[in-house]
Amino acid sequence: MRLARVSVGSLCDFALQSSTGEWVPFASVGVDAATTSEAIDEIRSVRARVAAGRGEPVHEDAQLACPIVAPTKMLAIGLNYMDHIRETNAKQPASPVVFAKYPNSLLGPFGDIVVDGDLTQKADYESELAVIIGTRTRRVSPDDALASVFGYAVANDVSARDLQHSESQFSRSKSLDTFCPIGPWITTADDVPDPQSLAIGSSVNGEPRQASNTKEMIFSVADLISHLSQTMTLEPGDVILTGTPHGVGFAMAPPRFLTGGDVVRCEVEGLGAIENRVTVTRAN
């Protein structure tokens, strides 16, 4: 099952994909949902109404918008793929490297990544598997952790490497406006039987950059949820970015950072792809 946000004309609403592949907005079946958390709460009701033939699909010119609205937390993990550890000559972490990626960074699956050239000259891409929490979760064990997942999506953890490498914390360099494209929709967990066996990759202007598999993760999705839930309550709609594999721009020889006009495509097997053009702006 796929949950998206669709935009057509003045409408922007959560929508469920029908068995015929059409997107049926929640409003067309009489359901209101302003946030991802509310959409998760209502999805069973919407699914039943769509299955019963209710609702009016949106037109073909509908665009997909960001499916994440008003999360209480966006958490991200650094150095979580063995192949990325090898390419950066980094030390394998003994526990997950956790940082925040703030909601102002959210961007739709096909919007423009806007790079402020006055702040960074080293914008980079990171294709990632995003996990969306579905139930309130506190101190869950790894064995039970996947039951907390509502679904999965594709994300790009865009990073300002010059800021990242000049500071001891990652959050500022990872949270510039538009630095978290995500989507193209949320695929529910029942359609992803094993999140640790998914091909993941990226390309820039059609040139392959990253090609790996989530089995390369050092800490699995279940491990990450359990670890995070020991110190904080995870709420429905919260997002966890699970790390990126090898092939990022700063690790290439020579490094290759994003420039204006570049088109970055990130994809995860079975979850679709997001594609975002890079725009560089300056104050003067």
Image (spheres, rainbow, N blue to C red):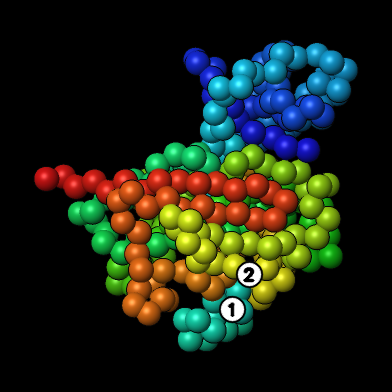
Query: In x, y percent, where is residue 153?
Result: 64, 48
Between discs 1 and 2, the one toward the N terminus:
1
Taking depth in this image into account, of 72 and 275 the one nearest to the observer is 275
Residue at the spot 54% in from the left edge and 33% down from the top edge: 65
Task: Provide residue 277's location: percent of width, then percent of height.
Answer: 40, 46
Confirm whether residue 97 shows in the render.
Answer: no
Q: Are marks 1 and 2 in contact (CB under 8 Å)?
A: yes
- Asked whether 121 or 238 is in front, the reply is 121
Classify the position of the N terminus by image quarter.
Answer: top right
Q: 25 above or below 120? A: above
Instruction: Name the residue tied to disc 1.
Output: 83
Q: Residue at x 31, y 64 (%)?
A: 122
How dense is the environment of label 2, judged by Cα within 10 Å: few (below 14), some, or many (20 and up)?
Answer: many
Task: Place residue 227 in its image quadrant.
Answer: bottom right
Query: In the picture, residue 56 is in which quadrant?
Result: top right
Helix, strand or loop at label 1? It is helix
Q: Amino acid at mark 1?
A: Asp
Amino acid type, residue under disc 2 in the picture: Ser
User: Does 25 sit left or right of 156 as displayed?
Assistant: right
The furthest residue to the front = 206
Q: Which residue is at the front of the view, 159 or 271?
A: 271
Q: Is residue 136 rendered to the left or right of residue 153? A: right
Residue 158 appearing in the image: yes
- 245 to the left or right of 195: left
Q: Position of residue 76 (x, y in %)?
A: 54, 60
Mark 1 packing: few (<14 Cα in 10 Å), some, or many (20+)?
Answer: some
Percent x, y for residue 89?
Answer: 48, 86
Circle 2 residue: 212
Identify the secondary structure beneath mark 2: strand
Query: In which quadrant is the C terminus drawn?
Result: top left
